[in-house]
Image (cartoon, rainbow, N blue to C red):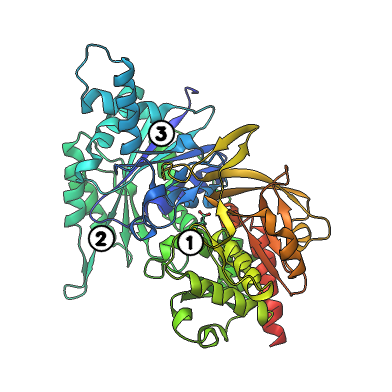
């Protein structure tokens, strides 16, 4: 690690869901606009080893990195805003920290010592924070949860120690809080923020900056009051007002002087303003689109749309590239099992079936595929969505009525089956039916070769791609001939030709299923080609209506 690397620790107070991840990602992006090299990390205090086994209702989407880490969705914000790829070394949980400590204890590494939270657990957290850094100017570390949570305490102690070890000139604490507005009093309330800062101070952490979420502007006298009571410079009380769309946040923070104050904290001269033109361009298109297009996402986690965070963003990006606003119609797939799909899908210009697990809502997803195929509606199936598309064609076109996935029925015609063996970087990965569920899927980036004359090849503009995966089951190659006879073609395969990655129906305006998750790599300023093309197909469909 270079001597110049500085650490910014972001904590949250008062309530959860304050958008710390977005705040961290936005700060990283403004610092980049000032020419700095950044890295972003997330420390999650829960006891799961990773979020991979958690229900999307508990946790929202599981974000997967190129190197196969299953992580918090905030890493998606980090990558989308900064364009810097996250790695395994950028995401940790208490479960993983304890796993490491206990492994070392069993190995005899601490021989003689009584293993304690301080120093053994905190040292492991510190090692994580300081590891795998080269010449970054700033490493931004976001601590999950809210200050005061019992699980978060070792993390606060660890970041206090890092700041102590490195010196305060190389560390900064930013605390994100909420100023609730009480309509009856007509006032923003600062007390919860004061209490939250007091709590941090109990742990030996004096925040250097407060980022105050608020639904209305914060009067200067309130900022002064917060500054005085929280022992912070007034210019470092930054207002984070609600904005219409998340891509305005870097611009809003910079206008509030956040990057300037961060530089000042570290004694870095900063002349002029950062170049935020790329964000301004994006915000301008979002505010003044040339048109709108309605696209259905047929999934099953409709009560918590965070489960489809990256899909939502990738569709927005596809819209930006086509200068259109994408209106997403979230359709609960279970509804399509109870009534005619037409009721829910007749007003949309494209249909996307996202990834998923388990039985609930599966038949509704198959209905959605059928509706898209039969009515020439542009269709994108992602992971489970692709598997459902293959099952639909096998059942409804090839006439194999019990075609299904062994994930749901071991006695079906196994068109989709458990992957038991595949190649990863030249080595063999093996799985069995009764193996562990955690961290054992086919995870991360794998290469895929695209067939000549395929739509996929045209869309990507190349014949070899790399995309991120997260699945345990796969389409069985054995059915390729039957699928072809039914009009569906496997146009993307692993380089050894053994794993199907993309399916298409050429006799359809736009029908693609992908075994990977393209949404994870889409960025507002670098939209994913599949989403750009899919949204374009939706606009074409709409124009023909
Ligand atoms: N449940 C399917 C599998 O494990 C699909 C997973 C997904 O959609 N991410 O293969």
The outermost residue toward the top is: 112
The crowding category of the residue bearing disc 1, from other C-alpha atoms within 10 Å (few below 14, some 14 to 19, many at least 20), is: some
Residue 98 vs residue 23: left or right? left
> How far across and how far down the image is residue 76, in percent?
49, 51
Within-10-Å neighbours for mark 2: few <14, some 14–19, many 20+: many
Q: Nearer the viewer, mark 2 or mark 1?
A: 1
Mark 1 — residue?
A: 409
Element type at mark 3: strand
Q: Which mark is residue 106?
A: none
Q: Residue at x 83, y 60 (%)?
A: 453
- Comes first in the chain, label 2 or label 3: 3
Q: Label 2, on which residue?
A: 179
The Cα atoms of the two marked residues, 2 and 1, are separated by: 51 Å
- x and y percentages locating residue 219 in the rendered image: 28, 62
User: In this orientation, which residue lies closer to the viewer: 68 or 259?
Assistant: 68
Give the class, few, some or many, for how many residues have Cα within 10 Å of label 3's Cα (few <14, many ≥20): many
Q: Residue at x 76, y 65 (%)?
A: 484
Q: Which residue is at a point 58% across and 59% down the rendered structure image? A: 414
Q: Considering the numbered disc 2 on the image, is that residue within a helix, a strand or a loop? A: loop
| Distance Cα–Cα, label 3 vs label 1 | 50 Å
Number of disc labels: 3
For the question of whether residue 100 can be seen, the reply is yes
Residue 486 falls in which quadrant of the image?
bottom right
Q: For mark 3, what is the residue?
A: 7
């Amino acid at each position: 690690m270079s001597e110049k690397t500085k650490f910014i620790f972001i904590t949250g107070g008062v309530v959860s869901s304050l958008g710390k991840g977005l705040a961290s990602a936005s700060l990283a992006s403004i610092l980049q606009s000032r020419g700095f090299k950044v890295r972003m990390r997330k420390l999650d205090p829960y006891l799961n080893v990773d979020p991979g086994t958690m229900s999307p209702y508990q946790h929202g989407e599981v974000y997967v990195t190129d190197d196969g880490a299953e992580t918090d969705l905030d890493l998606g914000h980090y990558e989308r805003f900064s364009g810097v790829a996250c790695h395994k070394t950028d995401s940790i949980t208490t479960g993983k920290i304890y796993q490491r400590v206990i492994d070392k204890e069993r190995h005899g590494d601490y021989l003689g010592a009584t293993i304690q939270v301080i120093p053994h657990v905190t040292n492991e957290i510190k090692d994580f924070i300081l590891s795998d850094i080269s010449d970054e100017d700033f490493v931004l570390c976001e601590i999950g949860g809210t200050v005061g949570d019992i699980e978060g305490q070792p993390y606060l102690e660890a970041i206090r120690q890092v700041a102590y070890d490195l010196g305060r000139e190389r560390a900064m604490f930013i605390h994100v809080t909420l100023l609730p507005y009480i309509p009856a009093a007509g006032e923003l309330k600062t007390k919860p923020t004061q209490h939250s800062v007091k709590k941090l101070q109990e742990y030996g952490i004096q925040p250097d900056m407060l980022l105050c979420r608020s639904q209305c502007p914060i009067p200067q006298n309130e900022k002064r009051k917060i500054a005085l009571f929280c022992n912070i410079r007034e210019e470092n009380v930054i207002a984070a007002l609600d904005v219409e769309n998340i891509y305005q946040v870097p611009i809003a923070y910079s206008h509030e002087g956040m990057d300037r104050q961060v530089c000042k904290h570290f004694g870095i001269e900063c002349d002029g303003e950062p170049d935020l033109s790329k964000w301004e361009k994006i915000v301008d298109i979002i505010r003044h689109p040339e048109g709108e297009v309605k696209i259905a996402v047929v999934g099953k986690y409709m009560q918590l749309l965070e489960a489809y965070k990256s899909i939502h963003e990738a569709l927005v990006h596809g819209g930006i590239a086509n200068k259109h606003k994408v209106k997403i119609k979230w359709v609960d797939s279970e509804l399509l099992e109870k009534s005619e799909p037409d009721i829910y899908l007749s007003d949309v210009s494209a249909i996307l079936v996202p990834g998923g697990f388990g039985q609930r809502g599966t038949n509704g997803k198959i209905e959605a595929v059928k509706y898209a195929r039969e009515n020439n509606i542009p269709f994108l199936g992602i992971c489970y969505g692709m598997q459902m598309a293959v099952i639909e064609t096998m059942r409804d076109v090839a006439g194999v009525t019990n075609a299904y996935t062994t994930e749901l029925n071991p006695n079906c015609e196994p068109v989709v089956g458990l992957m038991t063996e595949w190649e990863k970087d030249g080595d063999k990965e093996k799985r069995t039916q009764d193996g562990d569920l955690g961290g054992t899927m086919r995870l991360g980036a794998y290469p895929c070769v695209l067939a000549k004359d395929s739509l996929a090849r045209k869309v990507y503009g190349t014949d070899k791609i790399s995309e991120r995966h997260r699945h345990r089951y796969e389409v069985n190659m054995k059915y390729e001939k039957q699928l072809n006879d039914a009009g569906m073609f496997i146009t993307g395969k692993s380089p050894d030709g053994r794993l199907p990655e993309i399916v298409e129906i050429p006799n359809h305006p736009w029908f693609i299923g992908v075994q990977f998750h393209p949404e994870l790599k889409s960025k507002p300023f670098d939209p994913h080609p599949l989403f750009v093309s899919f949204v374009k197909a939706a606009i074409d469909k709409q124009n023909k209506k």
